[in-house]
Image (cartoon, grey):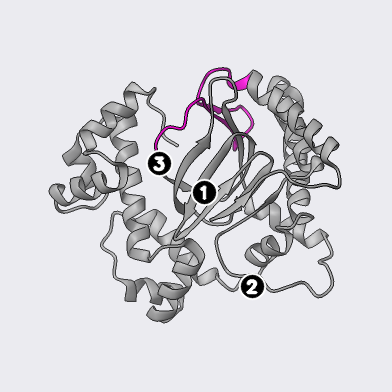
Amino acid sequence: MHSLALRDPIQPNERLQALRRLIEKVTRQIGLNEVCKTSIPGLAFYRMADLGTPTYCIYEPCVAIILQGAKEITFGEEACEFGQGAFFVTSVDIPTLARVTAASEETPYLSVVLKLNLSMLNEVIQTLEPPAQEMATQARGFVSGAASSEMLDAFARLATLIERPLEAGLMSDLIKREICVRLLLSSAGHWLRSVTRDGYRDKGIVRAIEWLKHHYDKPLHVADLAERSGMASSTLHHSFRKLTGTSPVQYQKALRLQAARSLMLTDRVDVNTAALRVGYESVAQFSREYARRFGAPPSRDIKHVREQGGLLD
């Protein structure tokens, strides 16, 4: 398992000070809540005071920084543990299994997540001259690194705008652009260029993912999906797994189950309705697959989530 934390001997004091400033701002906003969806579009804070249980979730394109504690995330078959000061970036919607591995009442797990605007990122890329002899990058849907003091400071300034709505309307996009710059100047930069630039070699897979996201309730025929993506079926399967860590069929299943869980929790639909609405023909099959993914049958799982505050990752 790959582990990453804040270990940079070059500027340890600056980075730790920047990290503490960001922790203070996040702590003030989130209080004792587990989730704080802020007034800044796409910016959210997360807090856990105990280790909890492994949770299946789908990460949209985003950048996340672990501010305190640690979290293990499994992308496909690759497990990575992220410690204090580590960041990871996802370029496509990726099903993951995540669990907090270090947290307590005294030192809770804290993280900040910002959804990525890929169009904005691509615009910034056009203005930055790429490094000479840039290395080719493995085509996968996520990358990680250690957050620099400059990146942490940019997030802290973005968090400050929560309490300044007038300034937020004028400056939040500017700071988000700066965060894009900081990411491109980090160790993740060449990867971000390869997955964002025009002519991205996995655009066919991105088309497949977009189709699945909008039609997960429809029957899936891999040959038809490959044709929509302009790829051979074998190429689609290989490249899809390489980018997302899973197959198209398993990806669709993850989308269906996540959508059904959300329907039962937020719209309060019953199990049968949720199963049929997301595309299952057999409620029994839905219940079996739901229990395998979330650890309990639908009704019991939703009851437990509501008792915990009704929050989904």
Q: Which residue is mark 3?
A: 55
The kind of secondary structure element at disc 1 is loop
Disc 1 versus disc 3: nearer the observer: 3
Crowd class of label 1 (few under 14; some 14 to 19; many from 20; radius 10 Å): some
Q: CA distance from mark 3 to mark 2?
A: 35 Å
For image coordinates 66% across by 68% down, the residue present is 198
Nearest to the observer: residue 178 or residue 167: 178
Q: Quadrant of residue 136?
A: bottom right
From the viewer's perspective, tell me whether residue 220 is left or right of residue 86: left
| Circle 2 residue | 199
Residue at (24% x, 53% y) in the render: 279
Mark 3 burial class by Cα count in 10 Å: few <14, some 14-19, many 20+: some
Of mark 3 and mark 2, the one earlier in the sequence is: 3
Total count of labels:
3
Quadrant of residue 26 within the rendered picture: top right
Q: Amino acid at mark 1?
A: Glu
Q: Nearer the viewer, residue 147 or 43?
A: 147
Look at mark 1 in the image and give the residue it sits on. 60
The image quadrant where one finds the C terminus is top left
Label 2 SS: loop
Which range of residues does the magenta coloring cover? 29-53
Taking 160 as reference, is 300 left or right?
left
In this rendering, is residue 154 above or below 244? above
Is 45 drawn above or below residue 224 in the view shown? Answer: above
Q: Residue at x 23, y 41 (%)?
A: 274
Alpha carbon distance from label 1 to label 3: 15 Å
Q: In front: 100, or 202?
A: 100
**Three-letter amino acid code of the residue under disc 2:** Gly
Q: What is the x, y in percent for residue 71?
A: 54, 41
Q: Earlier in the sequence, mark 1 or mark 3?
A: 3
Inspect the image, locate mark 3, and give the three-letter code of the amino acid beneath it.
Thr
